[in-house]
Image: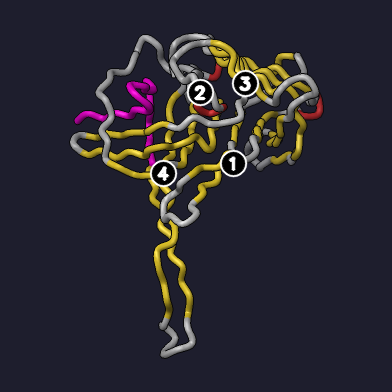
Amino acid sequence: MGRYFEFGTGNTFDFPTRADFSKRIEYFDDFVLGGGRDRRAYGLVRITPSLRVAYDVNGLTFLKYVLGHSNTSLSAGTIVPQSTIPSTTYKVTVDDESMSISDAKVDTWEITIEEGNPVRAEFSVIGKGIGTSAASVFNPDFSNMPILPHECTLKIGGSANTLWTRLSVRISNDLSPIFKTSSVPVDIREQGLSITGRLRAPQYSTWANEGSVDLIIGSLGTIILHQVKFTEVPPSVTGYDLPETEIAFTAYPTASTTAITAIVSGNKW
């Protein structure tokens, strides 16, 4: 049984693991002063197509779609936030069943590095329609396997840190579907860009420094957060485990640069 995931025209991840389609249907629903307690008026008002995809990471070029580059061809280089987000179609085919979301933009993207797992990413999109377009057939490139945690390096304030056990970085484009007089989105508004994350580590008080954060993901490239502020530092401990601290943070732009820059190597999404 063939299983395929495709975005755009011929673009694939080597190791997608899950795709969750959603078609949220909303009705207005008003109880009326006439008849019994179950008397109500209703009608269809909005349909919002969305999709959530998880994949094991062996490339970072997909950040072009996340951060808004209109040139979304597969090529390495420096990626910074743009003022608009490109739209494309995302397709899944399993055996003879196919689903797709058209005119879709990336709402969120999150990368997670955690001991015991490969580096994984998950993203969500909001589109204008759900269909049955089929994904193209492809074979994964098993000569370029997913990146593992021991291949990643974290620098905080310019200093390498090896104490952490889990790190996640989340990019949100804060998309808002616009319906006007239509029941499906006629436009998808791109609101404020925000970058947040969580870091799990012991001995917080001995190493914590705010500043820039460089996340070097093996040979795939580097995600640079130029000004990070810790927003929550709640230590926790159980009777069995060693004490660990879950640290929430937010990345901000500086006077001279954007909040995030991705320097991408290789030819994988």
Camera-near label (3 vs 2) is 2
Q: CA distance from mark 3 to mark 1?
A: 17 Å
**Label 1 is placed on what type of residue?**
Asp
N-term mark: 3 or 2: 2
Three-letter code for the amino acid on which mark 4 is drawn: Lys
Label at residue 80: 3
Residue 243 in view in this figure: no
Residue at mark 4: 128
| Residue range of the region highlighted in magenta in the rendering | 1-20
Q: Position of residue 122 (x, y in %)?
A: 48, 33
Of mark 1 and mark 2, the one earlier in the sequence is 2
For label 4, count other residues whose C-alpha is less than 10 Å away and answer few (under 14), some (14-19) or many (20+).
many
Q: Closer to the camera: disc 3 or disc 4?
A: 4
Q: What residue would you read off at disc 2?
A: 70
Q: CA distance from mark 3 to mark 2?
A: 12 Å
Q: Tell me which corner region of the image, top left, top right, bottom left or bottom right, holds residue 91.
A: top left
The amino acid type found where label 2 is placed reads Ser
Find residue 131 and report its horizontal and vertical position in percent: 30, 42
Q: Which residue is mark 1?
A: 174
Q: Name the foreground residue: 136 vs 201.
A: 136
Q: Which amino acid lies under the numbered mark 3 shown in the image of this protein?
A: Val
| In the displayed structure image, the side of residue 135 where residue 113 appears, left or right | right
Residue 5 within the magenta-colored segment of the rendering: yes
User: Which corner quadrant holds the N terminus?
Assistant: top left
